[in-house]
Each structure stands twice: as structure tokens, then as C-alpha cells.
Image (spheres, rainbow, N blue to C red):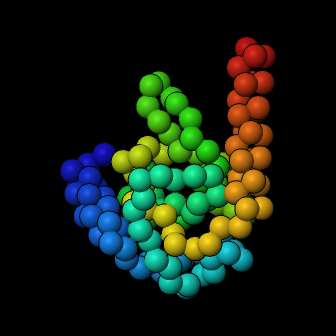
Amino acid sequence: MTNARQDTLYKLRRLALNSFRIRINGQCMAPVLENGQRVTVRSSSLYIPGDIIVFSDDFGQLLAHRLLGIYLKKGSVRYLTQADNAACADKGVTRQQIVGKILHPVPLSKRLHSIGRFLHFTGKWITARAIR
């Protein structure tokens, strides 16, 4: 990660301590988040499956995707996310990439669905490892 990106993420995380607003660009989280909708982002000490988290991708863009679960990879904690309208999960993100979560009520059904997706992807990963 470049110093400029690290500096930008640091500033965004500091803003998120209080909260700030962003505009959604795209339909990947529709109908929960619509294109052009303004949402409030706030940092949190705890992110749980079902939360919509805002994070920086490898290209420095901010993405708002649903958290499916948390796992360990080579000793570091990773957060598995997926857009509601995507067929596949994203590459795991680190805690340092997370800016905050969108302050939007998450129904229990969405939280349970997120956990189910995480278990599905975990099962596929275990199966792929077992076949090798």
C-alpha cells in the first residue's frame, strides 16, 4: 500500500470516529442501497456478519459491501465481504482497509443469510483443499 493511500485511509478512519456521509455509486447493493443514495459511515470496534462495511480496495476505491464473516489467513485476520448482487465473494480485506460501517438497520434475516453465505464459501474452500 502506498504512503498516499495509507494517509488517505488514516484520514477517513479519523473522520469515521464521529461519522461522515458518502454517496453510493452503482447497483451492487440494491435495493438496500440505491445508486446516488447518501449514507452515513461510522467506525466501529466490532463488525459482525450482515453489517455493510466500507473499505478500500487494492486500487484505492471505497467499496460498500456486506460482511459475511471473519477468518484467519497466514496469522492475520481477514474480513470476507460480498456485494448483495454479486455471485462471488470479494478477496478478503484486512482491518486496516476498513473505514467503517454504514449506519443502516440490518434485519436478523440478512445477518443469518450472511452467515449462511460465509459457511457456503468456507465449505467450498475446505472441499477444494481436501481434493488436492
Judge left or right: residue 22 versus residue 84: left
Q: Is residue 25 visible?
A: yes
Quadrant in the rendering for residue 113: bottom right
Q: Nearer the viewer, residue 86 or 67?
A: 67
Query: Residue at point 71% right, 34% down?
Result: 122
Up the image or down, 97 lies above or below 39; here it is above
Query: Residue at point 44% right, 31% down?
Result: 76
Q: Percent from the top left, x then y, of residue 125?
A: 71, 29
Q: Which of 2 and 23 is in front in this view?
A: 23
Up the image or down, 31 lies above or below 106; here it is below
**In what quadrant of the picture does the C terminus appear?**
top right
- Image label count: 0
Q: Nearer the viewer, residue 102 or 127?
A: 102
Q: Percent from the top left, x then y, of residue 13?
A: 32, 61
Q: Can residue 61 be seen in this view?
A: no
Judge left or right: residue 24 versus residue 1: right
Judge left or right: residue 69 versus residue 75: right
Query: Residue at point 62% right, 76% down?
Result: 33
Up the image or down, 124 lies above or below 25; here it is above
Q: Percent from the top left, x then y, of residue 23?
A: 48, 80
Up the image or down, 7 lies above or below 121; here it is below
Quadrant in the rendering for residue 106: bottom right
Q: Percent from the top left, x then y, of residue 130?
A: 75, 16
